[in-house]
Every structure is written in C-alpha cells, then in structure tokens.
Image (spheres, grey):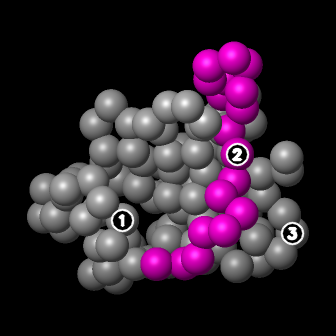
Amino acid sequence: MKLITEELRKQLPPLYSQENEKDPTIICRFFLPLTKWAWYVTEFDGKDTFFGFVSGEYPKLGYFTLSELENAEGPYGLGVERDMFFQPIKLSEVKKEFGENGDTINA
C-alpha cells in the first residue's frame, strides 16, 4: 500500500502551520497492524517529515518520518498501513481515546 498519495499530500497542512492552533486538525492516520502503534498526522513538510500524535508506549505529540513508516516492520512482517476510512478530526478527540488531555502532552 502506498502510504501517501498525491491527493493526501495536497490535503496535509505544511509543517508548523497549525502550531498556534489550540486544537489542530488530524488529517490522516497510519497504524501498524497487531500493535498499539498509530500515527495521527496534523502537518507534513511535503517530503518526509510529519508532525502529529503518536500512540505507542507513551502517547505524545512529536515528529516522525514517512521513511520510518515505510521501513517499519511489525509482527509477521506486516508493515505500516494508512487507515483508508479515517475522517479528519480534532486532536482533542484523539487524545480522549487515549485518556490524555491537552495540558499533559508535550512535543
């Protein structure tokens, strides 16, 4: 599966464009099947670097790269996939899923 299409690339806000937003919009979600890892993208530099919310060992905001996602390997050799049914939502909604509030997560 191609993780990022031209259409999706056009939808993703540039890196740092939502940094002053109190509740930025998450545009897409990537996940590693059979694990608790998921990456919720709020911004993209158009080449390799994303910013967003990462769930895993310790859910937090941070940077991650397309190349890391493309090379990640999970159980049974499975790779990262894009959630084809994900609809853009606010970051606060995703944080609720993980029991996080906006004041406790730092980049």
- Determine the residue located farthest toward the top in the rendered image: 76
Q: Image point 58% across, 45% down: which residue?
A: 31
Q: Which range is magenta?
A: 72-89
Circle count: 3
For the residues marked 3 and 2, what is the alpha-carbon distance in whole angstroms? 16 Å
User: Residue 28 at x, y = what percent?
Assistant: 60, 66
Q: Which residue is mark 3?
A: 6
Q: Image point 74% across, 36% down: which residue?
A: 70
Circle on res. 81: 2
Task: Give neighbour class at mark 3: few <14, some 14-19, many 20+ (Cα, 10 Å).
Answer: few
**Residue 27 magenta-highlighted:** no
The residue mark sitting in front, 3 or 1, is 1
For the residues marked 2 and 1, what is the alpha-carbon distance in whole angstroms? 18 Å
Instruction: Relative to 70, say whether 6 is above or below.
Output: below
Q: Secondary structure at mark 1?
A: helix
Q: Is residue 39 visible?
A: yes
Q: Secondary structure at mark 2?
A: strand
User: Residue 72 at x, y = what percent?
Assistant: 66, 28
